[in-house]
Image (spheres, rainbow, N blue to C red):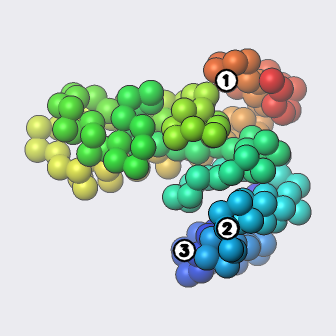
Amino acid sequence: MVAIGADRDGIEGLARATRANVPTFVEKVGDYATRVEWDAAIAAKIASYEPDLVVSAGFMKILGTPTLDAFPVLNTHPALLPSFPGAHGVRDALAHGVKVTGCTVMLADEGIDTGPIVAQEAVPVLPDDDEAVLHERIKTVERRLLVETVGRMVREGWTVSGRTVRIGNHTGGEST
């Protein structure tokens, strides 16, 4: 990890990074007159650390094109995309009556949960699940899957061809 960034102060991720001597930064949307200005500022801040991969974990903001055009951005979603995109994937899956849901790790693009899928894992929906219980069970799987996926991408490299992401090409980076 080269840095941990956030859009607000006081989050555990920043505290953990500080304890581990990993650089941190905060770019608050409210500190900028427009969202376009914030998009440019956060892209510039990320670029100053020269990352090979940006991992968006718990960052509930849509990153703008300055970041998406400059870096591969990995994101997660608590549903098996392309089903149930958006902010309420767990609620929507329950309302639909699915018996299996899960989580998705994807490369972010300009859309809402529309990027190429890197990894997915199923999570059963149990008869007594409510949104909070199911979401916690999904988050447990999602965290593990994200860590495993990032590790594989960093160790084995990855390629992107259209909507297909392949891990394990041993080239050490991304190509399109």
User: Distance from label 3 to label 2 (Cα)?
Assistant: 27 Å
Quarter of the image where one finds residue 163: top right
Q: Which residue is mark 2?
A: 34
Instruction: Give the tally of numbered discs.
Output: 3
Q: Earlier in the sequence, mark 1 or mark 3?
A: 3
Dot 1, crowdedness within 10 Å: few (<14), some or many (≥20)? Answer: some
Determine whether the residue tagged by mark 3 lies in a helix, strand or loop: helix
Q: Which residue is mark 3?
A: 12
Q: Nearer the viewer, mark 3 or mark 2?
A: 2
**Residue 3 visible in this rendered orientation of the protein:** no
Task: Give left or right: position of 138 versus 120.
Answer: left
Q: Position of residue 142 (x, y in %)?
A: 46, 44
Kind of residue sitting beneath label 1: Val
Do labels 1 and 3 touch, CB within 8 Å?
no
Kind of residue sitting beneath label 3: Glu
Q: Earlier in the sequence, mark 2 or mark 1?
A: 2
Q: Quadrant where the N terminus lies?
A: bottom right
Determine whether the residue tagged by mark 1 lies in a helix, strand or loop: strand
Which residue is pictured at 17% across the width and 31% down the height?
A: 97
Q: Position of residue 148 (x, y in %)?
A: 60, 40
